[in-house]
Image: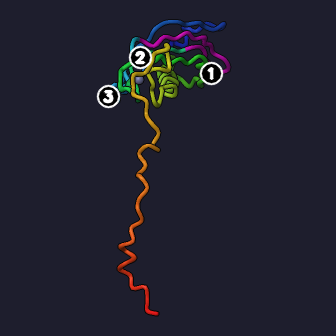
Amino acid sequence: MKIHLRQIPEEGLHLEGDEDCPIPELEKEGIKCAGPLHYSLDMGISEGSLWANGRLSQGVEVTCVSCLERFVHTIEVPDFALLTELTGPEMIDLTPFIREDILLNLPAYPHCDRQDGKVCKAPEVKPEIAKEDPPRKPDWSALDKLDLGKN
Ligand SMILES: [Zn+2]
């Protein structure tokens, strides 16, 4: 998402639209964009810096860690903000900033039932207690081999 500085008037600029998936390289890890990135940003130039703030939203197809089903999770960044010093080029690429915020908001352990009221089909995991061994009978055989000393 490249912004030409001359596009930004003194009073600032509001931009809304769609951009290509900012995290295409995550596809090999099973995280795939489901549709474009939506953005709604206000931006402006002040004291040699470009600022922008607004909302980002990106649907991603991920795998539920419980039932292993693929589902779409929507990453919402309601308070995206950036401030970057203008150091020369008249064209500023906002993609790295957007990418970073999308990555920060990726679910580390996606659960298909966290959004949209879906019910996860994964079988309920029983606590480990059930696996405990039955009480063991004391094994005296080792003691029998000991020479318990002579009186
Ligand atoms: Zn699930």
Residue, x 43% and y 43% (percent of image)?
Answer: 130
Decide if residue 12 is on the left or right side of residue 119: right
Residue, x 43% and y 30% (percent of image)?
Answer: 124
Residue type beneath disc 2: Val
Decide if residue 50 is on the left or right side of residue 146: right
Q: Which residue is mark 2?
A: 72
Horizontal and vertical percent position of residue 145 = 35, 80
Mark 1 and mark 3: Cα distance apart in space = 36 Å
| 10 Å crowding of disc 3: few (<14), some (14-19), many (20+) | few
Residue closest to the eye, 110 or 82:
110
Q: Which residue is mark 1?
A: 49
Residue, x 60% and y 20% (percent of image)?
Answer: 81
Q: What number is the disc on residue 28?
A: 3
* Magenta stretch bounds: 36-55
Residue closest to the eye, 28 or 88:
28
Report the predominant secondary structure element of the magenta stretch. Answer: strand
